[in-house]
Amino acid sequence: MPPDKPYEASLVGVYGSFGLAMALRIIPLPPDWFALNPDWIALLLIYWTLAAPDRVGVITAWVVGLSADALTGRLLGQHALAYAVMAYLNLRVRDPLLIFPVPLQCLWVLLVLLLGQLLVLWTERIEIADSVMRLIYWLPALTGALAWPLVLWVMPSVMRPESEP
Amino acid sequence: MRAQTSNKPLFATGSTLHFKLALCFCASLLLLAIENRGVMTAQRLPFTAMIAPIRQVVSVPTRLFHQLAGLGSSQTELMSENQRLKEEALILRGRQLKFEALEQENIRLRGLLDSTFKVGDQVLIAEPLAINVYPHENLIVVNKGSRYGIEVGQAVVDGNGVVGQVLRVSANSADVVMITDPSHAIPVQVNRNGLRTIAMGTGQTDRLELPYLSGNADIQPGDLLVTSGLGGVFPAGYPVARVVASPPEAAASRAYSAAPIARLDRNRELLVVRSDSTPLPRIPVSNDPIASKPLTNAAR
């Protein structure tokens, strides 16, 4: 679970972890496995909006989304739009979410990831949208939700506790 | 709206959050509209520059693995491979001799007919990076970009046949969309009888579809499909695919399918065809440009 008290998230930690997530997003897996690769960038975005809301907000999500668009060869703005909406939703429900048990958080992550994929599909060019409209398109949201406990387990080591004023 | 005021700075709450979302939403839609109309392409540059190192770093382990595998191969393997390559080079050189004579003859005949003809496209060797770009899309990223003169729309082939065309270019890399991408179509003709049609990608790297054929079209399994040169992207005459099977009689859509000849999923080197190669003179001059290529030196 993300720490209840705001930890001090260093800039290096935030952007370094986003860089790592981008590397994981394009990792050379066989095509069948790659279709299941969760959107690590979105997962980290959810994590950081919960753990460091003053550092990672809607605008940061938007910029990260633009990079994700360039990374995955989408039109500029597809992931940006999705990530901005996802960050907004997370910031709105942050307080109840922090005290949710992990399975409930997974459910929320699943919903947010599905919404993000829907937004990316919505802004997709029609000839591509036609070809991806299959059930397997939505599976990365499911694997992403299953990977959420892993994110919770790995990520706090990136942060250092806030120095008491 | 006041729900999350507990432990957050004042400016991130309430209506400011709404405002930021609205701002990002509108900016995204604006960017999408701009790019969809192709008005301006420069806005991608800072982001492609930012992600270029990530793409490079991700492909390093696979490249290292291939290099280590090369180190581990035994001397006998290397010697037999060397022998095989020498034989192959000999055969290719033999064909090349004949090709040059034919080319000169072709140029002379075209000169008589008063038409120009482009023979011998310039090519550039590029290596694909070992990364995936996006699921459900058949894209390869190659390690050369606009700095080497690669431009959007240039054809990409490998030693066997057509691979695809350049989709996007940055300074040091280029995205190549393969002929099997679901959104790609390539104008082809049957080598046997010149029948022209269009081969559509299916998303699977081993299958193309030929949906625009009439019921009585003269096409049969085993036919070689070559680029027809229509459309102006792919130069004419490169092999694309081989027709594999006729559709079942009962099927509603009588679409033939074809298997690409290029090894789309496992090639290590690609050739980018420079379509801006200047046409050769109609009446050949004494020292022809083909013979001055370094290939003839390497023959010895």
Image (cartoon, coloured by chain):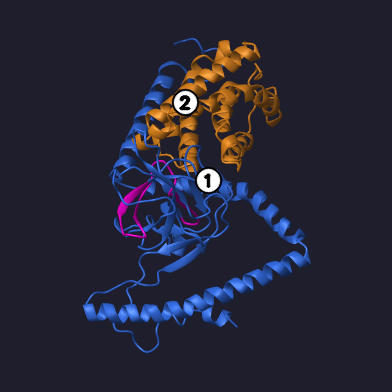
- Image position, residue B287 (x, y; %): 40, 87
Distance from the alpha carbon under mark 1 to that under mark 2:
21 Å
Q: Chain of mark 1?
A: B
Position in image of residue B123 (x %, y %) = 45, 67
Q: What numbered label is drawn on residue B51?
A: 1
Question: What segment carries the magenta color?
Answer: B171-199
Q: Is residue B262 visible?
A: yes
* B109 and A56: which is toward the camera: B109
Residue B83: quarter of image: bottom right
Closer to us: A142 or A130? A130
Identify residue for label 2.
A116
> In terms of secondary structure, where does tag 2 sit?
helix
Quarter holding the C terminus of chain A is top right
**How far across and how far down the image is residue A117, in percent?**
46, 27
**Residue pictured at 43% horizontal, 55% vertical:** B240
Mark 2 crowd level (few <14, some 14–19, many ≥20, 10 Å Cα) = many
Q: Residue A50, position in %: x, y?
A: 58, 21
Q: Which chain: blue?
A: B
Q: In the image, is B99 to the left or to the right of B51?
A: left
